[in-house]
Image (cartoon, helix red, strand yellow):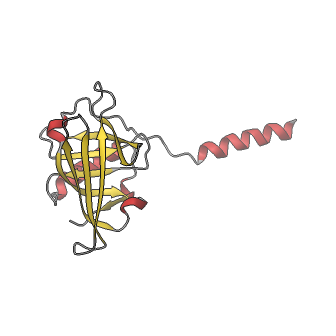
Amino acid sequence: MKLISTIIIACVFFSCKGQKPKVDNSVVSFLDITKYVGTWYEIARYDHSFERGLVGVTATYTLLEDGFIQVVNKGFKDSLTGKEKVARGKAYIPNIETPSKLKVSFFLFFYSDYYVLEIDKQYQWAVVGSKSDAYLWILYREPHMNPELYDYILNLVKKRGYDTSALIQVMQ
């Protein structure tokens, strides 16, 4: 009986020890989608297979008459003169009470979370994530962001518990 208790305690201890702290993925309280649409430049992101090796990445959002949002992501493989890769999708706001929590799809009816975590009042920069801590993007309306603003945004992201050392700065 003592051995079983020791094993249970050890399992609980070691399984909790390896867990990452939960990030704060709360979204902005207000988002005006008409101001959000347009072209954004990807300044930094977490690495993931569907954008691996891409530079010069932009995301262009267009509000459609049916309420959906057209999404066109573009980037270039390995260099700004590399082969262009384009992904077309659609997004929508499932709950108008929380317009900063969108759903986006690039394949049939499979939707992923798109959470606007931070945005400035002029809609010039944004931080986007999801309900998972595996996705994070820093977006800007221009291809280049000044270092002071980038550091400010990194501090916001770090306070939320995200690993800023895992961000890849995207060549524009």
Q: Quadrant of residue 74?
A: bottom left
Q: Nearer the viewer, residue 143 or 88?
A: 88
Q: Quadrant of residue 27?
A: top left
Give the quadrant of residue 97: top left
- Which sits in the foreground, 87 or 114? 87
Let me know if residue 47 appears in the view. no
Return the x and y of residue 83 as percentages of the image width and height.
Answer: 28, 73
Q: Residue at x 22, y 49 (%)?
A: 152
In the foreground, 4 or 74 = 74
Q: Residue furthest top?
A: 97
Q: Residue at x 23, y 51 (%)?
A: 139
The number of numbered discs placed on residues in the rendered structure image is 0
The percent coordinates of residue 162 (x first, y second) are 39, 47
What residue occupies the far right of the structure in this picture? 1
Which of 75 and 24 lies nearest the eye of the viewer? 75
Which residue appears at 35% of the width and 68% of the height?
53
Residue 94 vertical position relative to residue 13 in the rendered view, above or below: above
In the rendered structure, the answer to whether residue 137 lies left or right of residue 12 reads left
Q: Left or right of 49: which side holds 57?
A: left
In percent of width and height, residue 151 lies at 24, 53
Q: Quadrant of the N terminus?
A: top right
Specify whether residue 55 is in view.
Answer: yes
What residue sits 43% from the left and 50% below the top?
134
Classify the position of the C terminus by image quarter.
Answer: bottom left
What is the x, y in percent for residue 159? 34, 42
